[in-house]
Structures are given as C-alpha cells and as structure tokens.
Image (cartoon, rainbow, N blue to C red):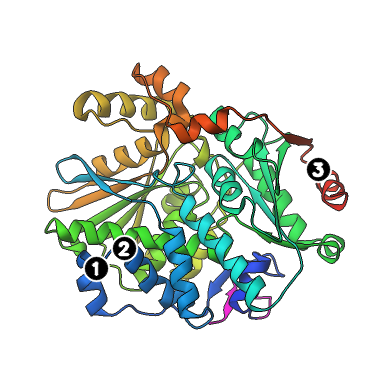
Amino acid sequence: MFYYSTNAQAPLATLKKAVQKGLAEDRGLYMPQRLPSLSAQFLGSMKNLSLSEIGFQVARAFFGEDVEETALRRIVDETLCFPIPLREVEKNIYALELFHGPTLAFKDVGARFMARMLQYFRHAEGDGRTVNVLVATSGDTGSAVANGFLGVEGVRVFVLYPKGGVSPIQECQFTTLGKNITAIEVDGVFDDCQALVKSAFMDAELNQHMVLTSANSINVARFLPQSFYYFHAIAQLQQLGFDGNEVVCCVPSGNFGNLCSALFGHKMGLPMKRFIAANNENDTFFRYLQSGVYEPKHSVATIANAMDVGDPSNFARIYELYGKDVDAIRANISALRYSDEEISETMCQCMQQTGYILDPHGACGYRALKESLRRDEVGFFLETAHPAKFRDTVQRITGHEVPIPERLQAFMQGTKQSIACQKDFEAFKDLLLRT
C-alpha cells in the first residue's frame, strides 16, 4: 500500500516512510492510496469475535501488505490488551468507555500501536538510527504517547504542551517519567505547539541532524488503529440485537483524528447510519458545516481542554475522504457546539438523572447525541477519558467525589521534569539541536 499527501505535491510514500516521517514533504497529511473493503462475512460475524480478533482483521486490511502477519497480530494483541466496554447510560444511549488503558484515555490505542509499528520497522530492516518522536498535546495525547513509548529502544519522545493548558493529573503523566521522555512546556496554546512540530518536520537542518516523526494523529499509525474500537462498538450493539445501520455515533472532537478513523472505517464497510462531531467553543468544524468555508481561528481555553484546537489537522483528511465536497460531508456528519456553561450543566444533569459520571469531553458527546438522536435510532458517544483525569473540574461542577485510580495516583507521586520553551521556532529548534 502506498500513501499520498493531501497537498498532492509530494511523492508517494511506503508505509514505513509514512510512519517514520509522519508529515509529507509538502506539509500534507498521508492518506492511503486506496481503502480496502471488509467482507460481508466479517462484518456479519463481528458479534462473535474478540476485540483483538476484530482489531487484527481491520489492521490486516490496512497494513497486511506491508507488515508480516504474525508480527501484525502480535502488535494488535499488545495494543488491545485492555477492555473497551459499551455501557448503557439511558435507553438507546450508550457510552463507549475508552479509558481502561494504561493512561485511562482513548489515545492509548493509537499510541501503543504506533510504538510497536516503529519497533517493527527498525528491527525488520536493521535500522539502527534513533527515532525522535515529536508530539504536541492539549491533554491526553502526551500522556498516552509518553507511556506508550516509555523505555522503547532507539526512540526518544519530546512532548510539547501549553503552559497551564493541561490538567495537573494529565501533566503528571508525561512530566514525571524521565528515561527517553522529555517534556517541553511551551509558553503558548496547543496550536502553537502543533505549529512548532510541523515546522520542525520542514526544517532541513533539523532533519539532517536527527530522524523526526510525529505521534500526533497526523501519523497514519496513530489515527488508523483507532478505527478498531468503532468496529468493536458495533459488534457489541449487534450482540444486543441492534442493526448497525440504525446506529449514530457521536465523537467529542478536537484535532479530529478520532472521528477521522471512524469515517475511514465507515468507508471500508462499517455499518453506521451517521456521525456527529461534538465541539466545545473551538468550533471551526461546526462553522464550516454552516458556511461551507473552512476558517480556522486561534484556540480558546475551555474545561474540555483536550478539544481546544482551533485548526484541526485532520480536517484535511476528512475533506479528502469526501472528495472535497461539503455537501457530501454534511450528508454523513453533523456538528453541535457547547459552551463551558452548557458542558457543566450536562455533567450535573446526567449524574442526577442516570448516575453516570461524565468527564467534560464525554459530556459534549453525550449532550450532542441526546439532542440529535431520533426515535428510530440507537447511538453511542465516546467517553474518551476517566473523569478522575479532570478531578477538580468534575468535583467542582457535580459536587460528587471522584476517586483517583491507583494508576493515576502512581503518576502523581513523581517529580515534575520539564523544559520551558518560548513558542518561537528558533528557540525550539535550538533546544532539539542541543539534545
């Protein structure tokens, strides 16, 4: 399988190059040259398959031409080694709980898969060079990537995060690790962090000095594996007697890698009726669907901080996937947006009416789904992170005590290790050149 750039000005890339480079030479995002179709037999039998088996079948469709089958199965098994249950919140509304991994966030899946994919290519081809992973985070990406790559031979990770822009527990998960993980505290917002990463990939001197790749959802090995749990969600609904073609999926959306992976799965045959993108006040995609014009804006801070993205990278993939046709996008995807006040109100109401504790991001998804679901539909929203990761916010809003899981408590015992950096690219470049 070859991969092309969304900007159409770069040569085709192999999977290895797409994974190791992250971003194409023309600053575009890599897209698979074709999307394989999954068989009706597999789609009809998913309800009888395990999460790992479902993941392997989907992974083989994406990567089977480039990764040896035994190795690919091992990568999937090591990635999907924790449950991803579907919990009923109220009639016909389910939460897909993606917070049972090592860092209690959905990004554990993509981060663990990518770490093992990089290892595979280094060992299979005897490439002894150190790979430097750059990742910008607005919250959970940094912790998932840092923990997914912790101790991986031949890989160094640089996590760029906005000063004061992530929760204290999230910060602990990537600033206390040491070893091959370096945390860089940027005096700016997430979009500044993301711009630094993208500029680094385009800098000739840096790329001559070190091998660079990204573990943000711009990387095909980060976002494509996230499609696994959408297939698993449909399998669980099939077990409950629902037809996938009546299912609506709602995704709290920031950089849009998560929703993008679901849309790729849908194009491959995943039975799903339609999708909803839930936005906070960073509503670039919502405004695009209204006007047909993509107008990114500077991100603003909200209580759903992992969604604080004003210029979502993966919009380029969605735009490409639907033939650059806004009407085709509108036919399959709708969007709603919520203020901090509305998110807080939703968290309180859901707990009082159902007993289910939402984190701020899941609250966006739950409310958007509840307000959009029709009488003949069933839906699920993604509960993307454990509410304890936003404990102060959740407890202040709901008045409900949120216990801290042991895994999070362990991170909080560590000592913060981070490097302060201005949002100026030359300062960041100098930092990398000195490492």
Q: How dense is the environment of label 3, judged by Cα within 10 Å: few (below 14), some, or many (20 and up)?
A: some
Asked which quadrant contains residue 59, the reply is: bottom left
Which-is-in-front pick, marks 3 and 1? Answer: 1
Q: Could you tell me the amino acid type at mark 1?
A: Met
Q: Residue 97 in the image: x percent, y percent?
A: 33, 45
Tell me residue 206's x, y (percent): 83, 60
Residue 424: mark in rendering:
3
Left or right, 133 with respect to 53, comes to right
Horizontal and vertical percent position of residue 370: 24, 40
User: How far, Cα to Cα, is label 1 from label 2?
Assistant: 8 Å
The magenta span reads 1-11
Q: Name the dominant secondary structure of the magenta segment.
A: loop
- Which residue is pictured at 61% across the width and 66% down the height? 118
Residue hosting label 2: 231
Q: Is residue 255 visible?
A: yes
Q: Up-down: is 88 above or below 165?
A: below
Q: Is residue 391 above or below residue 5?
A: above
Specify whether residue 289 is painted magenta. Answer: no
Element marked by disc 2: helix
Identify the residue position indicated by label 1 in the image. 46
Q: Residues within 10 Å of mark 2 (few under 14, many from 20)?
A: many
- On the question of residue 167 being in view, the answer is no
